Amino acid sequence: MAPPPDLHVRIGQLILKNPVLTASGTFGYGIEFKDLVDLRRLGAIIVKGLSLHPSSGNPPPRIVETPCGMLNAIGLENIGLDLFIREKLPFLQTLGTPVIVNVYGRTVDEYAGVAERVEEIDGIHALELNISCPNVKAGGVAFGVDPDAAGRVVRTVRSRTSRTLIVKLSPNVTDITVIARSVEAAGADALSLINTVSGMSIDVETRRPKLANTTGGLSGPAIKPIALRMVWQVAQAVKIPVIGVGGIASATDALEFLIAGAVAVEIGTANFVNPRATTDILDGIQSFLARRHIARVMDVVGSLEL
């Protein structure tokens, strides 16, 4: 009997037991899923976005269902880094699963402050730098759509942390490869893409936006073809690992991203529909590799034939 496929992947300094990660903002702080998912099986847990200080986010309504997806304008509501370290991290440290903290700031100094604080803490294995959220009034996406600004943030954070640094890219740009190359040159260890696509929805009866923020970020199956195309483009443009995100709801979806050049995938909106989406997708990837007699998941990565 053949041995099971080798699912290990490397992202910066991290060697993950498999390529299935959770997408920030869709999996809480991990503990919310402890009775639904075997969290020890995941490649890594990326927690809800964190800032240096607590944030209440945008006013409601903040979520709207759309055909093939959803719009959200949460506005990066979170408990703040210190409370996360005190109340959420201890549970995560018991799992043996790498913890990646998604962080954001409204200024370069805020990003730097978060990175410095994380550097002091054991049990956080990597940072995912959110320079791409479309739902905040300042910072975030303002950095992510400008190659010089994006590079400046990444260089500053790189100088403050020795942890693996993943940079999450915005799709709301003309050429995502320009941003990708800029943050690679500034010191990113890996890239994750894409974040949500800016969109809106209107209530025709009231003639008002359905979101209090007017616009929000579109996620779910509707954005998968966009995400897949951008992952393929970026994987060819940079030498650092790429993590695919956007509309992944099945093992077939995940495999498409791997074949396009991603070394790992993040599962997001699918968690709301199927809380066990992450482990279902992991099982499906493993079954595919075994059925095709592929010894290593890395043998699939970047195997697209044109």
Image (cartoon, rainbow, N blue to C red):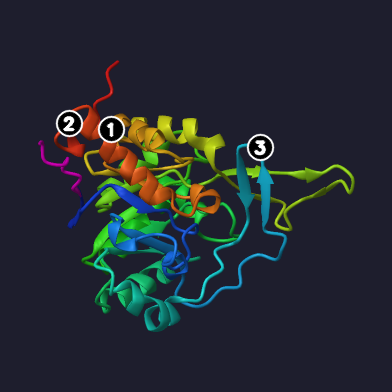
**Magenta region:** 1-9
Q: Secondary structure at mark 1?
A: helix
Q: Which residue is mark 1?
A: 288
The answer to whether residue 168 is seen in the rendering is no
x, y percent for residue 266: 39, 48
Please state the horizontal and vertical placement of residue 256, each as a whole percent of the image.
Answer: 36, 31
Q: Is residue 244 above or below residue 49?
A: above
Closest to the observer: 261 or 137? 261
User: Relative to 65, is 49 on the left or the right?
Assistant: left
One can see residue 288 in this view: yes
Instruction: Indicate which disc, 3 or 2, sits on the residue closer to the N terminus.
Output: 3
Q: Say which of 282 and 93 sits in front.
A: 282
Please say if the residues under marks 2 and 1 sit with CB atoms less than 8 Å apart. yes
Image height of 2 relative to 217, above or below: above
Res. 229 image quadrant: top left
Dot placed on the residue nearer the N-terminal end, 2 or 1: 1
User: Residue 228 sits in which quadrant?
Assistant: top left
Report the residue marked by disc 2: 294
> Which amino acid does the dot numbered 2 rest on?
Ile
Residue 47 falls left or right of residue 203: left
Secondary-structure class at tag 2? loop
Instruction: Reply yes or no: does residue 7 show up in magenta.
Output: yes
Question: For the point 54% across and 42% down, which residue is it?
Answer: 220
**In which image quadrant can residue 289 be found?**
top left
Q: CA distance from mark 3 to mark 1?
A: 29 Å
Question: Is 152 in front, or is 290?
Answer: 290
Q: Amino acid at mark 1?
A: Phe
